[in-house]
Amino acid sequence: MSKLKKLLPKRDLRARWLWVLALALTAVKLGLCSFQLIVASPDLSPIDDTLMFNLAKSISAGNWLGEYDWLTLGKHSFYALWLAFLNLLHVNIVVGGQALFAVSCLVLLAALKPVMRTNWGRLFVFAVTLYTPASWVENTLRVYRDNIYPSLVLLALAGLLGAFTRFREKPLRALPYYVAAGLSLAAAWLCHEDNALLLPFVLCAAAVYLAYLFLDKSIAHKKSRLALLLVPLALWGGSIAAWCGMNYKYYGRFIISDFTSSEFNDAMGALSRAYPDDQKRYELIPLSTRLALYEVSPTFAKLQDVLETPEMYNGYGDPETGELNSGGIHWVLRKAAWTAGYYDTAQDAENFWRAVADEINAACDAGLVPAGRRHSGVFSPIKAEYVAPTIGKFFDEVKVFVLFEQTEPTQILSIARPDQTEEWESYLHCQSTIAAQANTDLPYFAPLNQIAYKLLNLVTWVQRILLWPMLLLTVLWLVRYAPACVRGLKKKQPPADLAGSVLMLGFFLTGLLRMAAIAYLMAVTLSFDIYLMYLSAACAPMLAFLAYGTAKWFEGHALSASPYSLK
């Protein structure tokens, strides 16, 4: 322990220098990442990158999300609005995404002030989080929403941390954090479909805050503090309502997307309810089930001629067996309905899927086909046989996380015509990987780019090495801190940093929850190897907690016998 103490500065960092160093670290990262190149392959990503790009261009042209078809409201599309915003400012999308992540880290730095004893500790948490390798990896170089979604998640968590740990300060001091939390929660909700994974943290964090508010008699202005809770709720709900309002104005549907609409979820629930014994991993609605359901649902039968074709099988499944994989079944059904003429308007699509749901559920309820319980949702129902594969995928995720796999800061070679490349680079204000190394199909990177990438890879190796002592010191801190909390609570004198530490633990648990959900998705629906993109929103919060636990260990143990100048 004495050796660890010798590593510490003799006095704490002044607040001014804390922010100078934080901004310097931010500038360095932005500079390094500005050399990154995007991948632009319009013809290979029609429902992902190309969709977001086309939606953004429609927004820039003043046409909201463009002419309605099966893709227009196919996803939560806040990222398209972000792209249009960056285009308006003439900002490189890679730099813009990194700037947003830096803002979330700076908010975290400010939010930690009431719960950490030293500015050095806060700077350490900030630096580890800012230089999370998942923030610059290859999936962030796609023109896709996972470029900013992890930033929005971290900003929401940091905003709630800052708001809920300032229950002893003047109420208005917490207002900026409530605003940041509300706006980022709304943006995250509009950016991705899996935001229910954020709700446990939001609810538990609010419960911790309310417990302090009602149980601690020394806290003043309780009504004002309760009223502040309405700020993030209003921003959250108001932003979502505004988005739905725009969709209603242009398409006549007050929804975020028709992928998450009630009628499509009801239809998918009905389709996956029938013949449950025929379902397999990665085959939510087998061919045998579809053929049987055509006989009991006249509306669903209208898709048979366009759905059961080699073209559809080849794009979304196996052309030899006619099976459609679970990860693509949602898209191929929508494409088939569009091809058959049921996506001329949003109301046509709504009526079509409502009819499919009603007819198949009626057949199931009448016993015309074997069926499980009625449910609504686009994913496979949970079965006992899926538990073991899910656990296996979870440990695969842990391996990817702790070894920092898939963290190269480069992308593959773009595949695009010259006119497409020019259009994408012009709108996105960045360069793409269009040039290959001589006699290879590998992207070419100029010398300065290569230097930047080597430095980013060096940081990744530092994080790889640093992770293990952070894990150890965090466990040691928790082992010592938990009993102290129990003793303090019994004496009605809880540690001053208890609320903040509980919320920071919530960062880690939120990451674990996401990993568990993705493990199930990968075990049952998506039949490919673990992809860091799906885990990226968990990486920064989990590293932030490990850095926090490490800093708290130093503050509470290594500094206990030190002449350190504390705040």
Image (cartoon, helix red, strand yellow):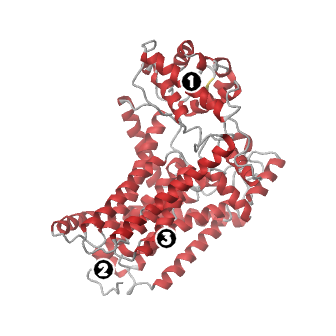
Quadrant in which the C terminus appears: bottom left
Mark 2, residue position: 559
Residue in the image at 64% along x and 18% along y: 302
Give the mark, 2 or 3, whose residue is nearer the N terminus.
3
Vertical relation: 65 (above or below) 272:
below
Residue type, label 2: Leu
Residue in the image at 67% along x and 17% along y: 305
Residue 114 point in image, percent of width and height = 37, 75
Mark 1, residue position: 355
**Horizontal relation, residue 201 to residue 415: left or right:** left
Residue in the image at 61% along x and 33% along y: 331
Mark 1 or 2, closer to the camera: 1
Dot 2: element: loop
Mark 3, residue position: 176
Q: Quadrant of residue 3?
A: bottom left
Kindly report the distance in space between the C-alpha atoms of the residues bearing marks 2 and 3: 32 Å
